[in-house]
């Protein structure tokens, strides 16, 4: 899924899906946040309506780049980010 989620909350993050590389089966995404060092959790699911999202990465912003090396293992995969507690 390519695209972004953006909210006006000052403690929110913006998730950018920047591309799928079919040659090697990876998906790259970036997270930006105006809070230096804010921990973000990247979650993935094969069902957008699922309540069973899996944590696949945790890292700090203001800019966080992540490559899902397992993206080609799923026919469809959705991503979201949330702020860590």
Image (cartoon, grey):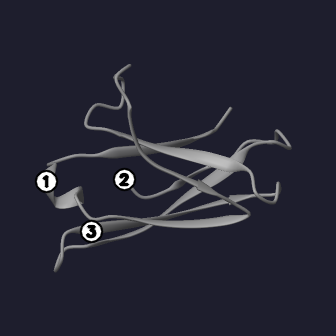
**Residue 12, quarter of the rendered image:** top right
Label 1 residue SS: helix
Q: CA distance from mark 1 to mark 2?
A: 15 Å
| Labels 1 and 2: the sequence-earlier one | 2
Query: Is 64 located above or below residue 81 in the figure?
Result: below
Q: Are marks 1 and 2 in contact (CB under 8 Å)?
A: no
Q: Pointer 2: what residue? A: 1
Q: Position of residue 8 (x, y in %)?
A: 81, 42
Q: Which mark, residue 73?
A: 1
Residue toward you, 66 or 17 = 66
At horizontal 82% and vertical 38% (from top left) the residue drawn is 9
Q: Which residue is mark 3?
A: 26
Left or right, 41 with reference to 53 = right
- Find numbered disc 3 in the image and state the secondary structure of the residue it sits on: strand
Question: In x, y percent, where is residue 44?
Answer: 36, 41
Category of crowding for the residue at label 1, using alpha-carbon neighbours closer than 10 angstroms: few (below 14), some (14–19), many (at least 20): few
């Amino acid at each position: 899924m390519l695209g972004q989620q953006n909210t006006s909350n000052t403690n929110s993050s913006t998730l950018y899906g920047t591309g799928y590389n079919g040659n090697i089966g990876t998906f790259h995404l970036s997270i930006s946040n105006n809070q230096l060092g804010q921990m973000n959790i990247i979650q993935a699911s094969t069902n957008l309506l699922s309540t069973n999202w899996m944590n696949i990465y945790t890292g700090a912003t203001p800019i966080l780049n992540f490559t899902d090396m397992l993206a080609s293992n799923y026919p469809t995969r959705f991503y979201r980010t949330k702020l860590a507690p």
